Image (cartoon, helix red, strand yellow):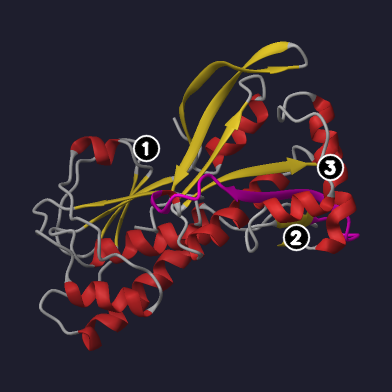
Amino acid sequence: MSDLPSVLFVCVHNAGRSQMAAAFLSHLAAGRVQVRSAGSAPADAVNPAVAAAMAEVGVDISAEVPKILTVEAVRSCDVVITMGCGDACPIFPGKRYLDWQLPDPAGQGIEAVRPIRDEIEARVRALIAEIAPADGPAGIRVIPLGPEHADQVLTIYQLGIDGGQATFETTAPGWEEFDAAKLPGHRHVALDADGRVVGWSAAVPVSDRCAYAGVVEHSVYVHPDAQGRGVGLALLRALIASTEAAGIWTIQSGIFPENTASLALHRRAGFRVIGTRMRIGRHHGVWRDVVLVERRSPVVS
C-alpha cells in the first residue's frame, strides 16, 4: 500500500473533464498524489479540443486512452470526484465523494473548452492544497545546486558513504568528476534557515541509446543531522518536477534493502519496487543485494 493520497476522476466518457482533471493533478502535485481517471462508457479517444486546450498550458494528454470505470478503481482510491455528468460510483465506507459541476466540453470548440479547463485547474490546485500541500519542512528551501555548494555537497556525500548503507562507493568524487557526471538542470540542494546545505539530489543518464533518452538514475543524500525532517522528500519532489518539465519519463535507482528509511522515502514520493538483485556486488568484502525502484511519470507520454 502507498502512503500517498489517491484520487479518481470520473465522467461518463473519460474523454474530457476527467482527463483534464487527472492531468492537472498529476502535473501540479509532482508525485505527491496517485491519480486515476475512468468512465462508465469510455470513448475511443480523448476529445481533440480538450487535448489542444491542455497543450496550450504545457500539459500533453494526446496519448491518453479513456478507461472503463471498475469497482476496484473506486475501492482503491481515497477521493472519488465526478464531473457533473451524472455518472454513478459504487459507495464504499471511508471514501470521500465529491461532484464538480462543470460544463460538458463534448462537441465544443477550443474557445468553449478553455474556461472549463481553467476552472478545473483552479479546483485541482485547491484540492492539492488540502490533501497534499507542497510546503516543505520548516526553514528549508530547495534551490539549484551550483559550484558554490560543492564543498558542502561532497561532505554530505562522504557522510552518506561512511554510514555504510547508501552506496557501493567508498570515497566521494572530486567536484570536477561530480560536476561532469550529473545532469544540468536536475541538481538540487536543500538549504536551512542559515543557508547551510543539508541535502542534495541529482541525476545521471542510464544510457546513451535513444530509446532510453527519458530515463535517469538519481541519488539523494541528506546530512545526518537533518534526517527525519522531510528534507529528502522535498529534494525528490524538486527532482520529479525538473525531470518531468524536461520530458524525462522514468527516474530509477538502486537501494540496499537494509536502508529502510530510503525505501520508505521513495514510496512516499511515488516510486515502486521493481525487484531485488541478489548478491549483485561486494561492499567491504560482503555480498550485497540491491532493491530496484522507479517512478514512471504519469505526465510525460
Query: In front: mark 1 or mark 3?
Result: 3
248 relative to 42 in the view: left or right: right
Residue 283 lies, in percent from the top left, at 73, 18
The reply to whether residue 285 is in sight is yes
Near-viewer residue (153 or 179): 179
Residue on which disc 3 sits: 156
Secondary structure of residue under mark 2? loop
Residue on which disc 1 sits: 94
Near-viewer residue (2 or 158): 158
Most distant residue in the bottom direction: 111
Most distant residue in the front direction: 209
Residues at marks 2 and 1, CA–CA distance in whole angstroms? 42 Å
* Residue 205 sits inside the magenta stretch: yes
- The residue depicted at 75 percent of the width and 60 percent of the height is 145
Residue 181 lies, in percent from the top left, at 68, 51
- Disc 3 marks a residue whose amino acid type is Ile
Residue 22 lies, in percent from the top left, at 33, 59
- The residue depicted at 26 percent of the width and 40 percent of the height is 73
Residues at marks 1 and 3, CA–CA distance in whole angstroms? 43 Å
Residue on which disc 2 sits: 145
* Residue 252 sits inside the magenta stretch: no
- Disc 2 marks a residue whose amino acid type is Leu
User: Which of disc 1 and disc 2 is earlier in sequence?
Assistant: 1
- The residue depicted at 20 percent of the width and 77 percent of the height is 49
* The residue stretch that appears in magenta: 191-211
261 relative to 252 in the view: left or right: right
- Disc 1 marks a residue whose amino acid type is Gly
